[in-house]
Image (cartoon, rainbow, N blue to C red):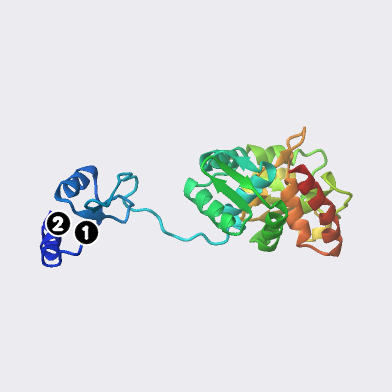
């Protein structure tokens, strides 16, 4: 390697120095060459060799990634990253990042291993999660809930009101639609978990409003007056609406207890009051 020869010439003139080069990538063959020449070298991928004659010898040959992502994580308690914290609240100990990602998958959503790793690292810095060689564990459930609650935002994009014919099994039509994600919102699911009655139409979160309307078809008629509607569709982007839903015997997908709490705690005074009982249930269930 030309760089090896050049750095050795420099060291010959300054014999108190030890030669080292920084290069874009070092595979095993290049590392072996450096070892024979007695020259240290490192690359941005974490591969390298450090040689100090008679004092130190370190060799790292992982070479798993030539272009590792260095993009910082935004808010670990919001959006898709928040699924990591949500999962830890339902199962607070996991053996590995992979096991945690698999658990999220079982909740109905996908997330990259890199994003899981960054979220865990961020929560570790906040002393909410503890991470060791063989364990990832939730340390402070209350603090995690508070962080998730403060970061929660209602990201409704569009909405549509429908009147549904008597006896219509609208949920079956939605479930039959390919690639459509849907679930009853936490606001309309609250009565399943606490003493709470919500007036008005049943509110349903969907990822594609037009597709949801198409799925209902002639069984539903558009309604301009909200108080006359049976269903209110919200088009949303946050995956939390569709994560860890609870399905009843008929197949209706209700919001999880955690999603319900998130929505109520950011609502009006009556909803916030109901959210306190729900928060206690969540903490006791961990």
**Percent from the top left, x then y, of residue 90?**
69, 43
**Percent from the top left, x then y, of residue 256?**
73, 45
Secondary structure under the numbered disc 1 in the rendered image: strand
Name the image quarter holding the C terminus.
top right
**Percent from the top left, x then y, of residue 86?**
65, 49
Residue 246 occupies quadrant? top right
Q: Which residue is drawn at 15% across and 67% down?
A: 14
Q: Which residue is nearer to you in this view: 269 or 136?
A: 136
Q: Residues at badges 1 and 2 in contact (C-beta under 8 Å)?
A: yes
**Percent from the top left, x then y, of residue 170?**
73, 41
Disc 2 marks which residue? 4
Disc 1 marks which residue? 21
Q: Which residue is nearer to you in this view: 205 or 269?
A: 269
Secondary structure under the numbered disc 2 in the rendered image: helix
Q: Which residue is nearer to you in this view: 261 or 21?
A: 21
Q: Is residue 23 above or below residue 218?
A: below
Q: Residues within 10 Å of mark 2 (few under 14, many from 20)?
A: some
């Amino acid at each position: 390697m030309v760089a090896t020869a050049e750095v050795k010439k420099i060291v010959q003139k300054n014999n108190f120095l030890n030669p080292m080069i920084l290069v874009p990538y070092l595979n095993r063959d290049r590392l072996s060459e450096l070892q024979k020449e007695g020259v240290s070298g490192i690359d941005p991928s974490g591969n390298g060799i450090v040689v100090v004659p008679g004092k130190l010898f370190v060799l790292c040959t992982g070479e798993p990634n030539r272009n590792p992502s260095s993009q910082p994580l935004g808010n670990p308690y919001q959006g898709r990253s928040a699924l990591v914290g949500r999962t830890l609240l339902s199962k607070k100990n996991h053996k590995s990042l992979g096991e945690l990602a698999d658990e999220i998958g079982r909740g109905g959503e996908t997330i990259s291993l890199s994003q899981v790793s960054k979220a865990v690292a961020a929560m570790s810095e906040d002393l909410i999660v503890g991470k060791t060689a063989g364990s990832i564990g939730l340390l402070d459930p209350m603090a995690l809930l508070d962080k998730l609650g403060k970061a929660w935002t209602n990201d409704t994009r569009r909405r549509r009101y429908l009147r549904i014919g008597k006896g219509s099994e609208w949920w079956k039509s939605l479930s039959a639609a390919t690639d459509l994600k849907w679930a009853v919102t936490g606001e309309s699911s609250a009565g399943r978990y606490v003493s709470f009655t919500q007036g008005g139409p049943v509110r349903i979160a969907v990822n594609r409003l037009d597709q949801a309307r198409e799925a209902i078809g002639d069984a539903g008629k558009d309604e301009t007056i909200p108080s006359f509607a049976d269903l209110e569709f919200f088009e949303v982007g946050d995956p939390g609406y569709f994560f860890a839903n609870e399905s009843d015997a008929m197949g209706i997908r209700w919001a999880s207890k955690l999603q319900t709490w998130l929505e109520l705690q950011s609502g009006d005074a009556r909803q916030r009051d109901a959210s306190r009982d729900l928060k206690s249930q969540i903490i006791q269930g961990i």
